[in-house]
Amino acid sequence: MKLTPPTTSATDKRWFGFAPIGIGPAVAVTILLCMLVLATSLLISGWIGARDALLHVAAQNARSVSRLVTEKAGRLLDPASAAIRQLAQDPITNATSIESRLGRLNGLSEELVANGLLASIYVGYANGDFILVRPLDQPAIRKRFQAPPRATFLVQSVTSQGGRRLGEHRFYTAGLELLARRDVPEYQFDPRSRPWFQDASKTNSTVLSRPYVFFSTQQVGITLSKLAADGHTVVGLDMLLDDLATTLGELRFVPNMELALIDPDGKVVAYPDLARILRREGESVSFQPVGALAGTGLAELMQADRDANGLATYLVKGERWLGLVEPFLVIPESTLRLMIAIPESALLSELQARRDRLMLVVTGLVGVLLLLGSWAGIALGRSLNGLTETARRISRFDFKTESATALPLREVQVLTEAVGQLGSTIEAFLDITGILATEPKVDTMLERVLTRFVEATRCEAAAVYRWQKDSRQMERGAAHGQTDQLPERFSYVSPVAGQTEASARTGSRRQAEFELRSRDGQLKGLLVLTHADDEAHAGPAFESFARRLSGMLAISIETRQLIISQKELLGAMIRLMADAIDAKSPYTGGHCERVPQLANMLVERLQAETEGPYADFCMSEDERYEFHLGAWLHDCGKVTSPEHIVDKATKLELIYNRIHEIRMRFEVLWRDAEIAHWQRLVAGEDAGASQARLDERLQRLQADFAFVADCNIGGEWMADAAVERLRAIGAQTWLRHFDNRIGLSREEAVRIQLAEPVSPTLPAQETLLADRPEHLVEWGDKRPPVGKDDPANRYGFDMVLPAQKQNMGELYNLSIRRGTLTAEDRFRINDHIVQTYIMLKGLPWPDDLARVPEIAATHHERMDGKGYPRRLPAERLSLIDRAMAVADIFEALTAADRPYKPAKTLSESLQIMARMCREQHIDCELFRYFLHSRLWQVFADQYMQPNQIDEVDVPAIEQIATAG
């Protein structure tokens, strides 16, 4: 054997004595060296610039904070100033009655909702009347005024009526629905005595009061008041010091910033910690000077030196602070001043943080760039490694390509795209092969194949046209992609032998056609492809691939059409058998067609349920087809049932109605009676007496025959007395003068010979009605293997086999208690289901149709396990088995073509089925569903005679079915 020397791989080559390194580490080291030099330069220059800017920025920040605080305070308090000016012009200032004042309640409530600092809005009139609106948004206020649960606003009013002053409280919802109205006699408030009224009456400007205790709530606050346009009425707005202090605390922009409002005397009137500045004694309040705020940075501000811009720089416990004292001009005509004290560290914290962040950013940037360099090298190596691994997978027959992220390098991207398209194309081809092999539906198969083909080959559109022989046109079937340029149908002429299919160019696109032909060369259709006119699609390789695909499509279409044709042929043969069975008997015609129709309707309705006991019932398409075939074949065994039994309309009927034979015997007795009469006359008896005996005899014969003929007609029940009378009539005798052993069939002659080996001497005396031994037809060696213990029983049948195959005895048949069938006849009728099962079990059903014999041969089983042919218990009966039983019984009951019973009405049939539920003959739950679904009405309208369709009391029938 010749040995091939090992090849040298790329990793074995050395450069200047060193093993080559990967492209990733090489790129990473290069970028690392560059980034180290850049980062060092940035850190040094950045630190020098930041250090010089710190002190200069601190002073500018303090002044900016002062302006921001003033502006924000203005935005908070300006709405109150605007509201007092607008309220001074409101019509409520001229209102003279409480009703007209309440008519402006909507505007007052809106102001309270819009401005959260307002504790109340009120109007004081020159005659001492007063109206106030306050929000009930604080638990303490609600408790003080005992507000109802839904109350949002409180209106307090004092009006003069008849020389006395009336105080009232009204409570309103947010929608201003009046909830409660209370008289408050103790509420004797005179606005004219209040400082805010008196001060505002002296000027047209807005007046700001000193802090004081409010009359109603005993809270401390300040009041903005203004004289109305009429010059007599004063409007006012209350603001709580608590709210003002809280608002002042919210104005802090930087950590540890201190804010306070002071009056001209240097006393603090507003501070976030109100308890430190406020002293309250009854209804009077006093405020502490700024010095009381020691340790806060505000106390030292008053003694600190300020520069030309009013900015003070001072130390508090060794820490540098910056402070400002400026007029608080937010409230008009206010003499208050705003104090702002900020630690320098708070002002510069952001800048210092920026310096630190810059250092972190520079450091991080260096790290990121280092990582970037490493990533670039590693990514490039990974891209190449990924391409290598993809090629290896393809070589190992794994064609699934994962989308790899390629670096923005043209060569790498082109290589990555080419390898990915290679794997995708191979994988698409394998998918197409799998679809062609497994998808049973032609249209679905074509759609899936075209979808994968367009994706893999980057075509713009693909369509399959089917050849229509009659019109000689191509008609479009499945299509995918941009099919707007592909016609629905067009005339087509196959190219002459030796020519290729058509190929046309439109602009930058090309359209190619490939014929689909079967194995015997018949034209099945056309594959049309639309693609870009580029290098990838112009070569012969693409055309070869498309041509191979068209061949595979043609074979797949032909195969599926063959399967469909075979399925249609099978269905037609089954339908032919069912029609033949129906045509065999004029009395059961249509039964084999009507039962499948009703059974399919019931199963379809059950499958459509989304709730209730049948919500989970579901059948696949194959199971539906299996059930369809089973329903059509449910009585195929009747082809073996003797017609004279299936069509037995009377008890004596065999091939013909033997009542005619009995009648002839009565005729013989009639003649014998007449002959006896004439013989008596010849013998000299009295003619009158003999005639009377004759008339009596003939009359009795007429009555007896009429009775026998009536017994021959099957009824619901035959009494014991009727059976006894029948036996008495049958005991009468007549003389037979002719040999009864000639002109017989071989089988009948054998039976007579076995029953009576010696022929009696003629004339022989015979009874009028006889159960003769030759009337018994034995099973012989054709005994059906349906007994439970029969060793030849291969299918699990469990039926009681009659002793004889047939009993043609005249008395035996005429004595049938119900209907026209003997036990032997009924077995022969029931045997059709046995034959159905045996016949269908003998056929080579495919796996998806394996239950057809079970479906067809189980509809005579019962819920109590007493049905036939296998006595299956309820737990072995599937829902479709039970549905078949319901459909078969309902059709049999409503059929108007049965020889042994009159046609039953719709209500009678359903009542019988309801009683069968009680007897555990059929599934009660399914029958109730059938009852409420009213499918019986649909069936009746289509198949039943008009005189059978009557009113149905569904609740009453359901009660019969469910009664204990």
Image (cartoon, rainbow, N blue to C red):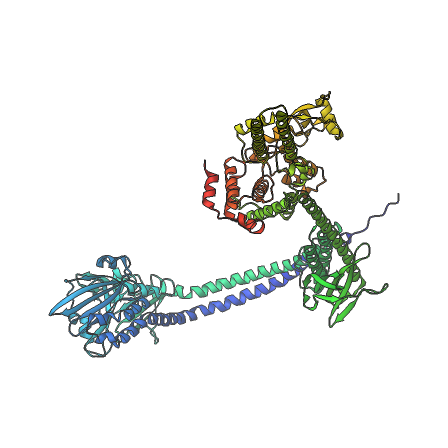
Q: On the picture, is 933 further left or further right than 664?
A: left
- Visible in this render: residue 527? yes
Q: Position of residue 57 (x, y in %)?
A: 43, 70
Q: Examine the image and state in which quarter residue 218 appears.
A: bottom left
Q: Nearer the viewer, residue 371 or 705?
A: 705
Residue 437 lies, with reference to residue 51, above or below; the image says: above
Q: Examine the image and state in which quarter residue 332 appears.
A: bottom left
The image shows a total of numbered marks equal to 0
Residue 721 lies, with reference to residue 131, above or below; the image says: above
Q: Nearer the viewer, residue 226 or 519?
A: 519
Q: Nearer the viewer, residue 777 or 831?
A: 777
Q: Position of residue 445 (x, y in %)?
A: 69, 55
Q: Position of residue 8 (x, y in %)?
A: 80, 51
Q: Quadrant of the C terminus?
A: top left
Q: On the picture, is 121 further left or further right than 370?
A: left
Q: Nearer the viewer, residue 932 or 915?
A: 915
* Residue at (54, 29) in percent of width and height: 722
- Visible in this render: residue 299? no
Q: Examine the image and state in which quarter residue 879 appears.
A: top right
* Residue at (74, 30) in percent of width and height: 744
Extreme-right residue of the structure? 1
Q: On the picture, is 77 further left or further right than 381?
A: left
Extreme-left residue of the structure? 163
